[in-house]
Image (cartoon, rainbow, N blue to C red):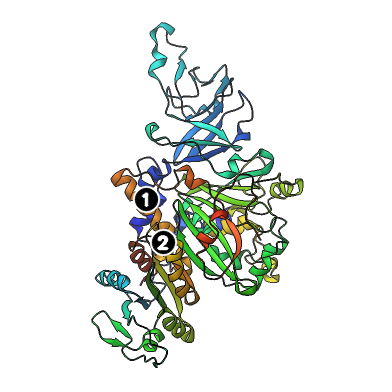
Amino acid sequence: MLSESARAASAAEARYRVAAPNSRARAVKVIALDDESEVIIKRLAEMPWRGATFLTVLRDPPGADQTFSMTGWLRDLAGHAKGLLDEIAGADNVVMIAHAGSAPENASIVGEACSLRRVMTTGLIVSAPATPDEVLSRTLAHLRPWALMLVIATGEEYIADMLAALQA
Amino acid sequence: MLRKEQSDLLVHTGPGTAGGRLFRSYWIPALLADELPENDCPPVRVKLLSERMIAFRDSRGRLGLMDEFCAHRGVSLWFGRNEEDGLRCPYHGWKYDTTGQCIEVPSEPVESGFCKKIKLKAYPLVERGGVLWTYMGSPERQPPLPEWEFALVPASQRFVSKRIQESNWLQAMEGGIDSSHVSFLHRGDLNSDPLFKGAKANQYNLRDSRPVFEVVESPGGLFIGARRDAEDGNYYWRITQWVMPSFTMIPPRGWHPVHGHFWIPIDDENCWTWSFDYHPTHALTDEQVNAMREGKGIHVKYQPGTYRPLANKDNDYLIDRAAQKAGRTFSGVEGIAMQDASLQESMGPIVDRTKENLVSTDNGIIMARHRLIKAVKALMDKDTVPPGVDIVHQRVRSAAVVLPPDQPYMEAAKDALVVREGTAHASV
């Protein structure tokens, strides 16, 4: 007589897996942290997505004598201002994209907001294959403290594959 | 989630398939050397990449791997007589050499030369590091012999085993790069398994069950770094190597040997899990080898006379619900290898990836699929040699290191991630 496992793990039994959706659409916020990344996410935004929102941030951080204001800091691709905390509050995952060599100081603002709201963060650095150590380090230093998962990819095409895999 | 057509590109590895062409670009492990222990020993059936073959060692020690069936009436040459430089079919006496060439057809006049017209498809079979390797691709693209470090150290410094896994190769391999399951499925084994316990690094693991992962493309595949806090603001890194198509090397622990796997398709619903342990600079101890033979670490106990694990799906993996409830094992299955295999086999022979819900910590799996699909397409469309064929890609090591907090680990640990002759692996 077949064991429970032998029967259940057969190809024949695989046909009887319940044919009903086992998840709902996720909200993934994809935030470009530098100019090169903004170009990439504009291309990505033209593809069909279930629950991905593409956003950019103002590049220049406030000076030491300035008070940081959230207003207008985060924008959608049409240039409309978005509230950072509001956007993050509804997110399942926030993906921050930076180009190797950039110094995305604004990662800390996104990261702190995600930490506050207990939202998963993914950092994705797009890097050319021969990027020097010190160039990559500059970007890593800003993203690493705020990314619970960090990926260094040698081509932007990975981002689309990753978002599809995450059902964004 | 992976679309079915993407998954199909990788999971089917028979002749004429895209995934099959990928695997046919590499030298792959076919048998343990001691399965053909002496000249004229019994032949062994081998199925790889959905092709049934027979392996034998002839009277002069030459190794052969060829079509299992006699060209005459289709008899399995497993019944053959291995004698006088060839394998003879017992039905009508047709005889083949190690290249698959028929060298005798007793019913035909020798002068007719008929036997020269008969040749079974054969593949090269070479011994290296206690393993018999084959290359099943086109002869004109045959790469140099494999240079994995475990296969090049003296025999006393390594231990290699294999086991049948009753699932597609890809879901088995994906388990090998899914570092985030270790804190759950294998918890408990770090402190009890003789091939893991006692390392200082285990304290880092046990203090922090939620490491942060960094996945980085390497020339041959991926580095998968798992980061935990160490002393003085530094990070403890465990860096796994994945080299295409299906080699993984797990980071070492303390003075224990370093280990890893190959997952090689038998057919689309079964694969060989090859497991190796080695030390780059000194012999394994008797205690270590005995533990490996007893199925500790990443090895298994076998059903006698087979390479099928003693705990298998026919006996429900000997699941012990009391041990599970008491926390001695997390899943109720004993041993790291079968803890993994039982769950991977439970997915069914080929898991339906359209139903999965990957999360961010699955980026190692997502990136591996991305690179495999990219390599398959480049191979099919442009005849591009895939990563992992180049022996430079094979001369790698996993590592466990403590590093300053702001450095890319693949650069800071650059020396530790490649083979350095005469130097031990980097371990904590």
Q: Chain of mark 2?
A: B
* B293 is higher (above) or lower (below) than B41: below
Q: Which numbered tag is attached to residue B249? A: none
Q: Secondary structure at mark 2?
A: helix
Give the quarter of the figure containing the C terminus of chain B.
bottom right
Q: Secondary structure at mark 1?
A: helix
- Residue B273: % across, % down: 55, 48
Alpha carbons under labels 1 and 2: distance apart:
20 Å
Query: In the rendered structure, which disc, 1 or 2, sits on the residue that comes first in sequence?
Result: 2
Which quadrant of the structure image shows residue B331? bottom right
Q: Which numbered tag is attached to residue B353? A: 2
Query: Which residue is found at the position 57% from the left and 29% from the top?
Result: B43
Q: Nearer the viewer, residue B134 or B342?
A: B134
- Residue A155: % across, % down: 35, 61
- Residue A13: % across, % down: 46, 58
Q: Which numbered tag is attached to residue B375? A: 1
For the residue marked with disc 2, what is the amino acid? Arg
Residue B316, visible in the rendered structure: no
Query: Which residue is found at the position 68% from the left and 58% from the top?
Result: B254
- Residue A109: % across, % down: 42, 84
For the residue marked with disc 1, what is the amino acid? Ala
Q: Chain of mark 1?
A: B
